Image: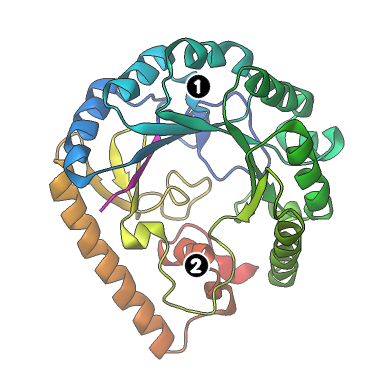
Amino acid sequence: MPEIIVVEVTNKCNLNCAHCMKNINGMEGGDVVDIDLYLLDKILKQAKAFRTRIVSMTGGEPTLHSEWEELIALLEKHDVDYTFTTNGINFDETHKVLVREASKRFKGVTFSIEGATAGTNDLIRGEGTFEQVTAAMRIAKSQGIPFGMQAVIGRHNMNEMSQLAALADEIGADELNYILMRPSPQNVEFLLSLLESDEVEEIAAQIKDAYKGRHVKIGMTTGYKSPDPFFVCRPLSMSMIDIDYNGLLRFCVDLTNYRGAIAPDTDIIANLNMKPLSAALKEFSNRVNRFRHNKLDWVSEGVFASTDSNPCLYCLRHFNKNDCMAM
């Protein structure tokens, strides 16, 4: 049952990163939306029965939620651990709520960064963003706010993975996680080939070994190649669920509101505005079983492609978000 609830608290964002998978700011239709706090309050009350341990806020840019201070107060009221991911652009203002309101239940913030230099980072995230995000991390360090870093790795920055680790170590981050770039219509020039993805995994493993014993922990998130076609990630184990800004339970945060999706809504499980969490989780369990049966069919029928050894790429194909066979 869901140990972690990922909540996409808004689809608003103050950047338009070249590699972003998300349909932000309603750019592909739909409204610009913040999650309703009354609904989130109801969901968190229901989640107590399942012993949910942590709420992880994403977006969009979560700090742009129009009731940011009230959102933090709500999480504090529910006495649940919580974190969020940010681009750091407005952290000089939004961190003040954390300093004023957050208890020890707040477990930290993850800053997104795409290079160890301004030239590399700003190519993806926009001019001046490297200086802004590193300034935000220094604010976090000075205020005693726990923080980590995450970097989406593509052709533009795979040669800076070691320098990113050195930056994380120097600036005082608790962790650095590498993420393989997922395909979307606007990031083709940065997308790694399968062989390059294998190389990234090897580099990440070497850096992880080199940093053993240091404060910063180096890791790589799910999405790398697995020798087991029936690899079980957190959504498939139902230990992590994703709720979007409309209150929809989705199959996985990496599928939600996917930019340029061939089929936008195939990952929707249930509408939590209308259905209690317990009933939605039953439907999720049924969908997971159907997903596994479908994969079994693909393997037995010989249509399991080379790209499908990467679990995230398999899901993009399964849910008809992106034709990863083109990689």
Using residue 273 as the reference point, say whether residue 242 is left or right of it.
right
Residue placed at 60% from the left, 22% from the top?
Answer: 144
Instruction: Provide residue 241's location: percent of width, then percent of height.
Output: 33, 48
The span from disc 2 to disc 1 (Cα, nearest Å) is 30 Å
Q: Please report whichever mark, 2 or 1, sits nearer to the chain's N-terminal start.
A: 1
Tell which of 2 and 89 is nearer to you: 2
> Answer yes or no: do the residues labelled 2 and 1 have beta carbons within 8 Å?
no
For residue 35, what is the image quadrant?
top left
Identified by mark 2, the residue type is Pro
Taking the image as drawn, is residue 66 in sight? no
Report which residue position mark 2 lands on. Answer: 311
Q: Is residue 188 above or below residue 277?
A: below
Please report the bounds of the magenta region as a residue range: 1-8
Residue in the picture at 28% in, 42% down? 52
Residue 58 locus on image (x, y percent): 47, 35
Residue that badge 1 annotates: 63
